[in-house]
Amino acid sequence: MTLRLLYLFLCFSVCSHAQFWVENASGFPLSNTGLSKIHIVDDNIAWATGYDGINPNVNVQRFTTTSDAGATWTAGTIDVGNANLGISNISGVSATTAYIAVHPRASGQIGGVWQTVDTGITWTRQSGALFNSATSFTNVVHFYNTNDGVVIGDPAGGYWEIYTTTNGGTSYTRVPSSNIPAPLTNEVGYLAQYTHLGNNIWFTTSAGRVYHSANMGNNWSVFNTPLSDFGGTNLSGDITFSTANKGMIQDNSGNLFITQDAGTTWNPVNISGTGFPYGGAIAYIPNSSRVVSTGGDTALAGTAYSTDDGITWTNVSTDQHVDVAFLDEDTGYSGGFSTISTQDGVYVYTDSVLSTYDQLATDGFSIYPNPSSEFINILSTQPIEKVEIYDINSRLLMEYSNISLIDVTDLQSGIYFIKVNANTTSTTQQLIKN
């Protein structure tokens, strides 16, 4: 595609989906403050941290939060008693209570976990998560609810320094080395490089590996990926999961890899069409085939979405987006840059193109649920005459007439294609069988 054709395509897409995002004020008082490390609590509450958008090496201890679905954001400073400590990420559990992972930026500093219960006015270190050895480095804190949380750090004492709590951080227990596969030589984690879904949590490493826990961080497994490093100078990546089994990796060149077995195996996604992902952050809409990609690099900035697990993409924006997070098909945010305290800095999803029923409007039919392990329902705007199920090699496996509820239990896990014939027209969509 020529640059002119690409430009025309992007302009058309932006005009067609001008309301995918609405940019609101992040509340940060300084211009060019970036918003990232977004954690969505529910359909009204979300928290995020700030960073220096001009010189990211400048240490910033700021947060912002919303309790009205992103319409307004209240920003504040994070006082942990040492202005030189770094803020790794933030995890909220309510409009008033949140936790931050704090990492050392110089020898002799001690990080850990701090909590606020007054919307960030005061922050208190939770001493149970020690992180006090010479190699301690706190990368991630995540709370699943008001009681259960996990904190993930680099290896210390020969194994990953991971703590769990069941009482809101009043006390923590370090996960024993027998519950965590051993790190490789010089393997470390990265700041806020994790994703979660239900009781599942995954984090990525400098060795291109993904650690996974299905029980809130108490037991772990590890898998290799096609990437050699998730945070290197030349190669980096982001990870997202739609279900406990289906996930996607996006590298900084926009290459995609998908897993259907929680990360045990990864296969490249063969992208087709004129749209493309951006190689920055990526986020699945949970329990769906819909995924959003954003880019914060000035050379490749924008937003794109896919409704078929990354095979085809629609580009909708060429603004810089430094992060992206979605709770469901209605609630999502992306980070931008503030200009003044009352303008810009956070993008709020306001479209309907990620809705379950958007595919119904586009193709005339929609498959639900997708992915599925047992039955699928086919919603159609026209009476269904025939349904055909094909495998990835275009072999016809099943054929039905005048039916909208189909049992797919006997299909092996994988990717299939559903062809629906209705009112002299036929349309095909992808089905993921768990």
Image (cartoon, rainbow, N blue to C red):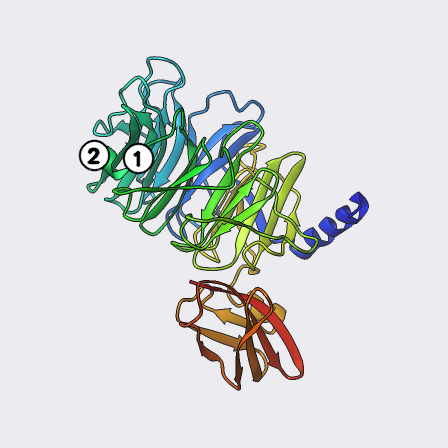
Rendered position, 265 above or below 424: above
Using the image as rendered, state which of residue 303 and residue 238 is in the foreground: 238
Extreme residue toward the top, this view: 108
- Residue 377 x %, y %: 46, 75
Q: Look at the numbered disc 1 and give the secondary structure of its residue.
A: strand
- Residue 154 x %, y %: 35, 28
Say what amino acid the circle numbered 1 marks. Val
Using the image as rendered, state which of residue 136 and residue 271 is in the foreground: 271
- Residue 63 x %, y %: 42, 33
Say what amino acid the circle numbered 2 marks. Tyr
At a point 59% along the width and 82% down the height, the residue shown is 382
- Near mark 1 (Cα within 10 A), the count class, few <14, some 14-19 or many ≥20, is many
Residue bearing mark 1 = 151
- Near mark 2 (Cα within 10 A), the count class, few <14, some 14-19 or many ≥20, is many
Query: Which of the marked residues, 1 or 2, is nearer the chain's N terminus?
Result: 1
Using the image as rendered, state which of residue 103 and residue 50 is in the foreground: 103
At a point 54% along the width and 71% down the height, the residue shown is 366
Q: How many marks?
A: 2
At a point 56% along the width and 27% down the height, the residue shown is 233
- Residue 189 x %, y %: 40, 31
Residue bearing mark 2 = 172
